[in-house]
Image (cartoon, rainbow, N blue to C red):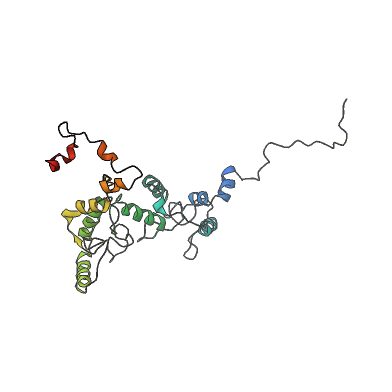
Amino acid sequence: MNRLVGVGQIRLVAESPARPHGETQDTIRGSKDPHYVLAAHLPNPEGTACSSCGFTYSTDRPLCPPVVEALRTLTARAHTRSFSDYSTNQLRALEREHCGTGRCRRCGFVYTPTVRVCPTSRRIAIELESRFKAPMSEVRAGQGLCSGKGQVWTVSGNKSAPWRQAVAACAQCPLLASCTTELDRRLASGEKIRDQILAGRLFSGKGDEIAPEMFDAYADRCGAKTKRRKPRPKSRPTRRAATDQSTPASSPAQDVPASPAGGQPTLFKGAVA
């Protein structure tokens, strides 16, 4: 029988190593993915303990240790991408993930009787409102509908539809009266309002107020491109310019047909007569 020299005892190894008792693929994945931990460790129906690990909540410790560690991991991550980079469909899909019972299942925010949405969900809502893809809402009591959404009330681009929607939102704002008073005071002091919509009134880049019926015309002016100037036709060379060339001065006159009667060119016929 053939035998390999230098080869020791061969030990067969299972395709996957045996896991400790009670450890499954889900628990391995959960130990690495903080979002999975937040989705798995939810409060029980009574809201007194974690339904996954059994940790009993208290006033000092309203979250179980795995959730605390997952939230610490997510907080340490850098969030550099702005919601303005997302499409509307992506924002709606992300908004559906930031919900839950008692706590947001995506970011772990604990709801209170007065706060029923997490900060991320609120930021998504503001972005959708700024695109007029969701109804306008107050960020906080005593603040206008434009609070935190200044980009919507900035006059830019060459489309009048967003301007009309911003003006319509001002008409429903509970602070319209106080905003109108403040705007009148600023205008009376000589201040120029440029490229802004304030108190339901639109001001151009020069500080002129644009009436609502002129929004379309103003949008056309904002989007108008400078027309290209047509090149001027080249002027025909004069007789004096022709004499400066190397050809003799009499050569242009030779091309003029002569009069059959007097032998003079037709060009000088009137002068000869």
> Of 239 and 66, which appears nearest the observer?
239
Quadrant for the N terminus in the image: top right
Residue located farthest toward the left when viewing the structure as drawn: 273
Look at 67% across and 39% down and name the residue there. 16
Residue 51 drawn at (x, y percent): 49, 51
Q: Quadrant of residue 103?
A: bottom left
Residue located farthest toward the front when viewing the structure as drawn: 262
Residue 33 drawn at (x, y percent): 54, 49
In this rendering, position of residue 201 left or right of residue 105: left
> Of 64 and 74, which appears nearest the observer?
74
Residue 204 drawn at (x, y percent): 24, 60
Residue 229 in view in this figure? no
Residue 217 drawn at (x, y percent): 19, 52
Look at 80% across and 36% down and name the residue there. 10
Task: Report the number of numbered marks.
Answer: 0
Look at 26% across and 37% down and name the residue there. 254
Q: Is residue 137 above or below residue 230?
A: below
Residue 127 in view in this figure? yes
> Of 38 and 201, which appears nearest the observer?
201
In this rendering, position of residue 215 left or right of residue 11: left
Quadrant for the C terminus in the image: top left
Q: Is residue 235 above or below residue 184?
A: above
Residue located farthest toward the bottom when viewing the structure as drawn: 189
> Of 218 and 271, which appears nearest the observer?
271
Q: Quadrant of residue 166?
A: bottom left
